[in-house]
Image: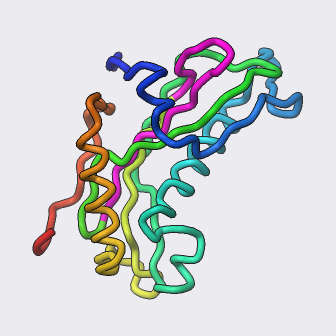
């Protein structure tokens, strides 16, 4: 699916979750950054962005719950080559009492273009029962605030069109 992208200016107005330059050990036999490195940057960026809502790496130990990625959709739009400077940015697309839907962008700063996107659907899972669970009240409130801030942005995000938030149970 060929969905329109927001502009580089719109994306880079979001906080930079990561920044760097493509290193020699990130290059594959075709002379561009490896797919694994794209996914590593965008996945780590998504995890970092979720920390704003209390879902950082301390969350599993503190609450015996963790985020499980149940759906990803990656798009590779422009190659990144050795030495290219990049930033990663994440936007919250939707949230419920037990799920988070995000879009991460990898921006080629030297070429002024979007290099890759990673849309992700994450579920909150109780680590004892291994079942989907409700977030803590503080996390629900933080997600609601983040979602309101995201929805106030003047640009639209179109994802792959196949990801669906799980049925909402209870009140938001």
Q: What colouring does the structure picture have?
A: rainbow
Q: Left or right: 28 with respect to 109?
A: right
Count of picture labels: 0
Stretch of the chain drawn in magenta:
99-116
Toward which corner of the image does residue 80 lie, by quadrant? top right
**Picture residue at 24% right of the left edge, 43% below the top:** 151
**Residue projecting furthest to the left:** 171
Instruction: Give coordinates of residue 168: x percent, y percent.
Output: 15, 64
Q: Residue 40: x, y in percent?
A: 65, 44
Find out whether residue 109 is within the magenta segment.
yes
Q: Quadrant of the C terminus?
A: bottom left
Instruction: State left or right for residue 27 relative to residue 145.
Output: right
Which quadrant, please, contains the N terminus? top left
Q: Decide whether residue 105 is among the magenta residues.
A: yes
Residue 140 vs residue 63, the one in the foreground: 140
Q: Point out residue 78 in the picture as x, y percentages from the top left corner.
A: 59, 15
- Is residue 14 left or right of 121 when viewed as pictured? right
Mainly helix, strand or loop, the magenta region? strand
Q: Is residue 61 above or below residue 107?
A: below
Please state if 43 lies on the left or on the right of 31 as rendered.
Answer: left
Whether residue 104 is situated above or below residue 170 in the rendered picture: above
Which residue: 24% across, 53% down?
A: 165
* Along the viewing direction, whichever of 93 and 77 lies nearer the viewer: 93
Residue at image point 34% right, 80% down: 136
Q: Tell me if residue 15 comes above or below residue 141 in the rendering.
A: above
Residue drawn where x is 54% and y is 57% of the image: 47
Q: Residue furthest top?
A: 111
């Amino acid at each position: 699916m060929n969905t329109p992208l927001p502009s580089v200016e719109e994306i880079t107005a979001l906080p930079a979750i990561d920044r760097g330059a493509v290193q020699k050990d990130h290059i594959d036999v075709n002379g561009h950054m490896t797919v694994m490195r794209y996914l590593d940057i965008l996945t780590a960026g998504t995890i970092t962005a979720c920390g704003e809502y209390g879902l950082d790496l301390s969350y599993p130990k503190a609450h015996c719950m963790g985020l499980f990625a149940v759906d990803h959709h990656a798009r590779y739009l422009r190659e990144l080559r050795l030495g290219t400077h990049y930033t990663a940015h994440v936007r919250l697309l939707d949230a419920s009492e037990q799920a988070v839907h995000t879009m991460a962008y990898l921006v080629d700063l030297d070429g002024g273009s979007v290099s890759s996107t990673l849309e992700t659907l994450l579920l909150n899972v109780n680590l004892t029962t291994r079942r989907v669970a409700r977030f803590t009240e503080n996390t629900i409130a933080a997600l609601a605030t983040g979602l309101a801030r995201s929805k106030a942005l003047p640009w639209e995000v179109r994802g792959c069109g196949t990801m669906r938030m799980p049925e909402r149970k209870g009140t938001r």
